[in-house]
Amino acid sequence: MKRNEIKHLIKNIEQCYIDLDTNKNIIIKENNKKSGVYLITNLITSDIYVGSSVNLGRRFKSYFTIYHISKPVRSNTIINRALLLKKKKKKINTVMHILK
């Protein structure tokens, strides 16, 4: 995705969550059974992930399970790198935006 496309997405932010790991229960609860597009940014590496789901709460809940994080196939994904880096560095490194 090109930077100008990302800028267009950012104009449509509905909700912003700072630090996925700390706020995971709030993120899951507030987005349960909602469909939409989300943008996750790793503040350390500047990696950006754009995704969508028909049930955002269920999607986000899966991101925080040990099963999801520990799968070798997913170990190098932007989301997993962000969550695992948080555990090592003990500082805020992720921001999630829910788009309109």
Image (cartoon, rainbow, N blue to C red):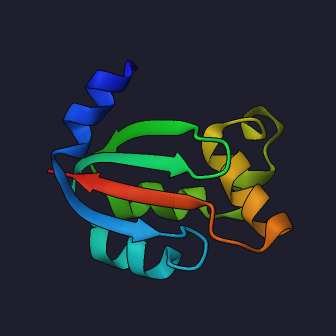
The one nearer the camera, 70 or 17, is: 17
The answer to whether residue 93 is above or below residue 72 is below
Q: How many marks?
A: 0
The one nearer the camera, 42 or 72, is: 42
The residue at 83%/38% (across/down) is 72
The residue at 71%/72% (across/down) is 91
Residue 58 image position (x, y, % from top left): 41, 60
Report the side of 80 relative to 39 (left or right).
Answer: right
Residue 100 image position (x, y, % from top left): 14, 50
Report the side of 11 relative to 37 (left or right).
Answer: left
The residue at 73%/53% (across/down) is 69
The answer to whether residue 83 is above or below residue 4 is below
Q: In which quarter of the image is residue 30?
A: bottom left
The answer to whether residue 56 is above or below residue 76 is below
Report the side of 77 relative to 89 (left or right).
Answer: left
Report the side of 100 relative to 96 (left or right).
Answer: left
Quadrant location of the N terminus?
A: top left
The residue at 37%/24% (across/down) is 3
Residue 98 image position (x, y, % from top left): 28, 56
Q: Quadrant of residue 74?
A: top right
